[in-house]
Amino acid sequence: MRATALIFGASLAVALACGSIAQTPWGGYLKGREPETLSILPPAPEVGSPRDLADRAIFKATRALKDTPRWALATSDARISIADILRDFSCATGVNLDERDAPALALILRRVVPDMVSAYGIPKDAYKRPRPYLRDAGEICVDRSNDLAKSWDYPSGHATFAWTAGLIFAELAPDRAGPILTRARAYGESRAICGVHSASAVTEARTAGSSLVAALHGDPVFRADLEAARAEMAALRTAQVADKPERCDAEAALTAITPW
């Protein structure tokens, strides 16, 4: 089952390690001790159930966001790599994050990829729920492809990673937990705005991410890496502040409003 999950998460895992594959410790932290998200998450909505009907209604309603600033943010959020995640949380953390200045943090994000792929990939494989744009007509914010169509909706891998990363960032800068977790929530919502995931797939990705981070805290290597990243974040926050305040203000205004 774990091998299957890794297959379903392969494209996302490669994207997350883009440009850094040679430096990626692919073994992860948990190595078979990942939380049993198949039992933790509620089952995917059954066709015709209230949850399913709500998902379809949200998909149709959010098509109206096309060509708005929120659609543009969702399109940007669809690009996911370690560098993208660091950049996208820079406003929320209050510092400009990149792999050069935050190598300890980048290491955690890179190393957690295999654990995360199991957390969302096993439920995806079990439920095999089609993505919403395959059921209802409507624009999506990324190119349609066979690989996208062949992967599953529930739960969202992008949203799982964003929430996992957000919880880690919030531990490193607890006084910024509000804006950090708001950004993480909005990052997941971008997947539904984009039209490639249902609202329930986004919501339960947060459950998957929370379960994963709880399990990670039981691993001594993760805890050691977290302390190194904590010191790194403190030094960065002393040395600099995030630039482009207008961009950050615009982002905060967009993420403050939930789309459904």
Image (cartoon, rainbow, N blue to C red):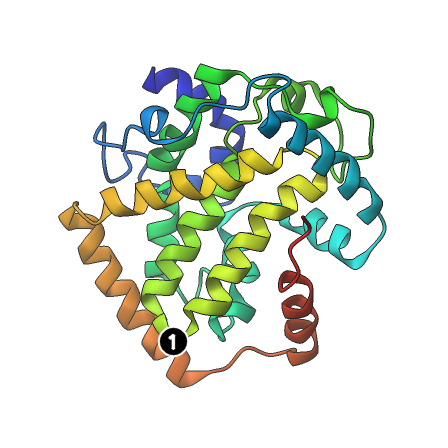
Percent of width and height locating residue 84: 56, 53
Relative to 142, say whether 249 is above or below: below
Q: Is residue 9 left or right of residue 51?
A: left
| Element type where label 1 sits in the image | helix
Q: Is residue 158 left or right of residue 134?
A: left
User: Splitting the image into 4 quarters, where does residue 6 fall?
Assistant: top left
Q: Is residue 75 left or right of residue 108?
A: right
Neighbour class for label 1 at 10 Å: few (<14), some, many (≥20)? few
Relative to 47, say whether 25 is above or below: below
User: Splitting the image into 4 quarters, where does residue 169 fall?
Assistant: bottom left
Front in this rendered view, residue 195 or 142? 195
The amino acid type found where label 1 is placed reads Asp
Front in this rendered view, residue 144 or 37? 37
Instruction: Give the residue displayed 24% in from the left and 40% down from the top.
Output: 29
Percent of width and height locating residue 236: 39, 77
Q: Which residue, given by chain and number where applicable, does mark 1 sit on?
A: 175
Percent of width and height locating residue 9: 47, 27
Q: Quadrant of the N terminus?
A: top left
Q: Is residue 184 left or right of residue 221?
A: right
Instruction: Give the residue displayed 65% in from the left and 32% down from the top.
Output: 55
The answer to whether residue 78 shows anywhere in this view is: no
